[in-house]
Image (cartoon, rainbow, N blue to C red):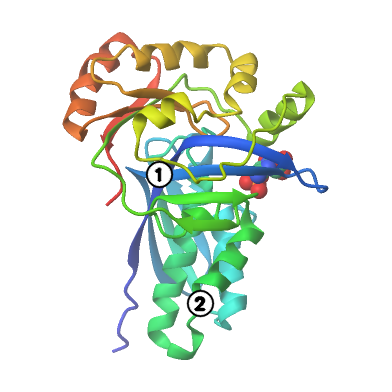
Amino acid sequence: MMQKDVGIKVFAPAKINLYLHITGRREDGYHCLDSVFLFTGLADELVMTPADEMRLVIDGPTSGALAGEAVDDNLVLRAVRLMGEAMGVSQKLDIRLTKNIPVAAGVGGGSADAAAAMQGCATLWQNKEQDHRLSSNRMIELAEHLGADVPPCLDGKPVRVEGIGEELSSVGAAPDWGILLANPNVAMPTPAVFKAYKNSGLPFSAALEDGPFWTDVNWLRTVARNDLEATALALQPEIKMVIDALAALPGARLARMSGSGATCFALFGSPEEALAAHADFVKKHPRWWSWAGATFE
Ligand code: C5P
């Protein structure tokens, strides 16, 4: 009897941008960033199993319009095809993606899914044939093809991101912060926010020559910011209400929008403080999507 192929489970954690400075624009229209990505305990899950046919089925609390069988251009399927080509492997996979991260919400859900799919393929296929092993630089190069935010999502560790997302530097471990995420349940497509930012004519930020003091909440609050926040607020004023509600929570040390929005985050001294604040927050704001917990382990 043939042994049935076993699947693997990969986690795709949501990111927050502790700060996001826009330092310029490239000729191709992409914006140059300086940002630190921090990964949260909120994660999508991918179960990847070798199969006769390629298939991706999406479910989970935030799957919404994506629920059901995915179409070919889904970023996860593109990631698998790209890895297959790069590694010279033609194996098909049956993938179940359980979405817990809100979609088009500034917390990198789609990019995290693509990065996790790449890591899943690497794990499945490297085990089969050691010669197929890809270097981490090659993984970053491949991830860039899938989207500017995919390379920083490959490791799930705090990372400073420059260029349009491909220049990565390790920044060490995160403090044991608690995180509360909230958004007003509206999708904010990233290209629309960058376009509105460009049209606003806001000046670019200077580069952080000394590097970010990203574990210092006081520095994050007073020196760093999210340059897309004003633009996103103009497009969707309810984001301001979310930030104000987060800032007013007992124990909140910083409240800021993540990425191109609409999700905002508050940082707390510990996960317990975030969970305690969340219990009241959901009662006060039942129409908003929200989550509280720790950083990604
Ligand atoms: O690469 P990705 O698909 O994530 O980007 C979506 C869109 O967001 C791009 O087409 C571009 O308009 C904008 N963008 C940008 N600068 C970045 C990342 C994204 O202008 N660094």
Could you say which disc has been placed on residue 38 in the image?
1
Q: In this view of the protein, can residue 103 be seen by the observer?
A: no
Q: Residue sitting at 62 percent across and 77 percent down?
A: 85
Work out which residue is located at the far right of the displayed protein and give it.
Answer: 27
Give the spatial CA distance, label 1 vs label 2.
Answer: 23 Å
List the residue tagged with mark 2: 135
Query: Would the CB of label 1 be found within 8 Å of ligand 1?
Result: no
Asked if the residue under mark 2 is in contact with the one under mark 1, i.e. CB atoms within 8 Å, the reply is: no
**Circle 2 residues within 10 Å: few <14, some 14–19, many ≥20:** few
Judge by depth and name the residue closer to the eye, 225 or 209: 209
Where on the picture, by quarter, is residue 86?
bottom right
Spot occupied by residue 286 in the image (x, y as percentages of width and height): 34, 14
- Write down the quadrant of residue 116 in the picture: bottom left
Q: How crowded is mark 1: few (under 14 residues within 10 Å), some or many (20 or more)?
A: many
Q: Residue at x 83, y 47 (%)?
A: 27
| Whole-percent x, y for residue 50 in the image | 42, 73
Three-letter code for the amino acid on which mark 1 is drawn: Leu
Mark 1, secondary structure of its residue: strand
Q: Where is residue 192 in the image (x, y as percent from the top left)?
A: 70, 30
